[in-house]
């Protein structure tokens, strides 16, 4: 098995990590949305999730 760290596309790794982490944080925040400030915080963070999702799909097309 030939594994070379220099051949890894670190931008894609970072995007996948950020997208998975943001989804986990969004779900955990949504579950805690019984408090109004958590609900408002999730709504304010939605553009960040959209940007990560869009960047991930844009990098897949290349």
Image: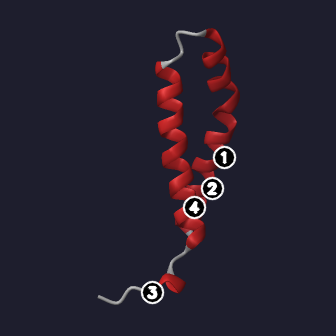
Q: Quadrant of residue 45?
A: top right
Measured Cα–Cα span from mark 2 to mark 1: 6 Å
Q: Percent x, y for residue 29?
A: 53, 25
How far apart are the two marked residues, 2 and 3, measured between alpha carbons?
25 Å
Tell me the distance, in whole angstroms, between the alpha carbons under discs 3 and 4. 17 Å
**Callout 3 crowding tier (Cα within 10 Å): few <14, some 14–19, many ≥20:** few
Its colouring scheme is: secondary structure
Judged by depth in the image, the label closer to the viewer, 2 or 3, is 3
Residue designated by label 2? 55
Disc with the residue nearer the chain's start (3 vs 4)? 3
Q: Secondary structure at mark 4?
A: helix
Task: Determine which of the numbered discs, if any, sits on residue 4 in the image.
Answer: 3
Seen from the viewer's position, the closer of residues 12 and 32 is 32
In the rendered structure, the answer to whether residue 15 lies left or right of residue 4 reads right
Q: Residue 25 or 49: which is nearer the viewer? A: 25
Asked if labels 3 and 2 touch by Cβ distance under 8 angstroms, the answer is no
Q: Which residue lies under the disc numbered 4?
A: 14
Label 4 with label 1: CB-CB less than 8 Å: no
Eyeballing the image, is 35 above or below 7?
above
Mark 3 or 1: in front is 3
As measured in the structure, the alpha-carbon distance from the residue carrying label 3 to the one carrying label 1 is 30 Å
Q: Residue furthest bottom?
A: 2
Q: Position of residue 21 (x, y in %)?
A: 51, 45
Of callouts 3 and 1, which one flags the residue occurring earlier in the amino acid sequence? 3
Badge 1 crowding class, 10 Å Cα cut-off, few under 14, some 14 to 19, many 20 or more, is few
Identify the disc placed on residue 51.
1
Judge depth for marks 4 and 1 and give the one in front: 4
Q: Nearer the viewer, residue 57 or 7?
A: 7
Q: Secondary structure at mark 2?
A: helix
């Amino acid at each position: 098995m030939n594994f070379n760290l220099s051949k890894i596309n670190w931008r894609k790794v970072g995007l996948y990590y950020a997208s998975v982490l943001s989804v986990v944080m969004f779900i955990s925040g949504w579950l805690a949305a019984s408090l109004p400030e958590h609900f408002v915080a999730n709504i304010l963070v939605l553009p960040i999730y959209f940007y990560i999702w869009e960047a991930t799909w844009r990098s897949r097309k290349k």
